Image (cartoon, helix red, strand yellow):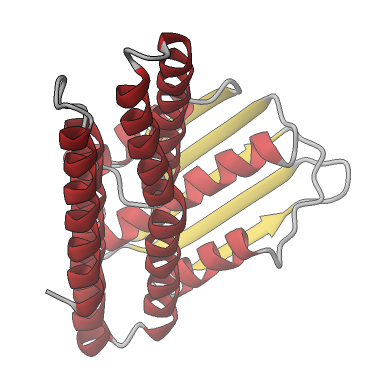
């Protein structure tokens, strides 16, 4: 266990004990500490997974010397770990406090207890949304299980935009190439909705001459920040696989993103 993981485990255990003590001090009753303890367990499991991926990335560094991609991955993992610590974990602590105070006020002040429970419910929704946002930066299980067509189709189903997806692959590309292609599609789709104010997006994936080609085109207002962190991160990911990322986004639109990645296995 790494030092950071050990600290996280100790912190989670301390909070769990703290919640149980509050429950015991207020006369027991319904065992509400179960819920914050469950969330703390989920947070620890996510952190452990991040540490596992970090260790795997270090091994890959020795084997393949893909310094640029690994540095980006380290940055992403550090960001996720920081967001877990500063965001969702803080929400869970506040959630536990609200539940504890609600337990204390159930008999003496039911209205206040109801308000605290409503606040805890909002906190639960916020924590779950934050966890979902963090999970978007991690390779989704559907990609590993069912491939690019299903994974990109799931992305398209979750957006209010009109998205046309065309995936024409005779075989599955290597895992690293598949992941890069997925994140290119995900970033292109997210940018089309958030920044370009597009209404329609076309995503095409195919293999040409031993290379995987991913193209995302939208009908938005263009002007994408090619030097921004999102597109620069994608470029490093693609270039680490000896590929190339091209972005065309004139003012007024449209925007086209094209990644070409060797996929010989």
**Residue 216 can be seen, yes or no:** no
The foreground one among 76 and 124 is 124
Q: Nearer the viewer, residue 74 or 12?
A: 12
Q: Is residue 102 above or below residue 5?
A: above
Q: Residue at x 51, y 57 (%)?
A: 259
Q: Is residue 129 left or right of residue 176?
A: right
- At horizontal 72% and vertical 30% (from top left) the residue drawn is 198
Horizontal and vertical percent position of residue 107: 32, 12
Q: Quadrant of the N terminus?
A: bottom left
Is residue 45 placed above or below 36 in the rendered structure? below
Left or right: where does residue 211 sit relative to residue 1? Answer: right
**Residue at point 33% right, 29% down?**
99
Q: Quadrant of the C terminus?
A: bottom left
Count of numbered marks = 0
- In the image, taking residue 241 as reference, residue 60 lies left or right, namely left
Picture quadrant of residue 31: top left
Q: Quadrant of residue 30?
A: top left
């Amino acid at each position: 266990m790494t030092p950071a993981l050990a600290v996280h485990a100790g912190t989670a255990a301390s909070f769990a004990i703290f919640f149980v003590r509050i429950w015991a001090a207020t006369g027991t009753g319904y065992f509400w500490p179960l819920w914050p303890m469950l969330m703390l367990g989920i947070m620890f499991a996510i952190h452990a997974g991040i540490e596992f991926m970090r260790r795997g990335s270090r091994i890959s560094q020795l084997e393949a010397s893909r310094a640029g991609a690994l540095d980006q991955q380290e940055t992403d993992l550090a960001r996720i770990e920081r967001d877990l610590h500063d965001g969702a974990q803080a929400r869970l602590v506040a959630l536990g406090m609200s539940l504890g105070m609600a337990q204390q006020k159930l008999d003496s002040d039911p209205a206040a207890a109801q308000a605290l429970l409503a606040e805890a419910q909002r906190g639960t929704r916020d924590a779950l949304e934050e966890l979902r946002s963090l999970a978007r930066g991690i390779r989704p299980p559907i990609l590993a299980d069912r491939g690019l067509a299903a994974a990109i189709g799931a992305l398209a189903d979750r957006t209010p935009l009109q998205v046309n997806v065309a995936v024409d692959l005779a075989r599955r590309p290597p895992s690293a190439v598949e992941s890069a292609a997925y994140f290119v599609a995900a970033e292109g789709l997210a940018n089309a909705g958030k920044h370009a104010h597009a209404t329609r997006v076309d995503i095409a994936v195919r293999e040409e001459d031993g290379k995987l080609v991913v193209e995302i085109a939208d009908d938005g207002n263009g002007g994408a920040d090619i030097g921004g962190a999102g597109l620069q991160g994608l470029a490093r990911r693609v270039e680490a696989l000896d590929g190339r990322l091209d972005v065309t986004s004139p003012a007024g639109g449209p925007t086209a993103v094209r990644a070409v990645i060797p996929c010989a296995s």
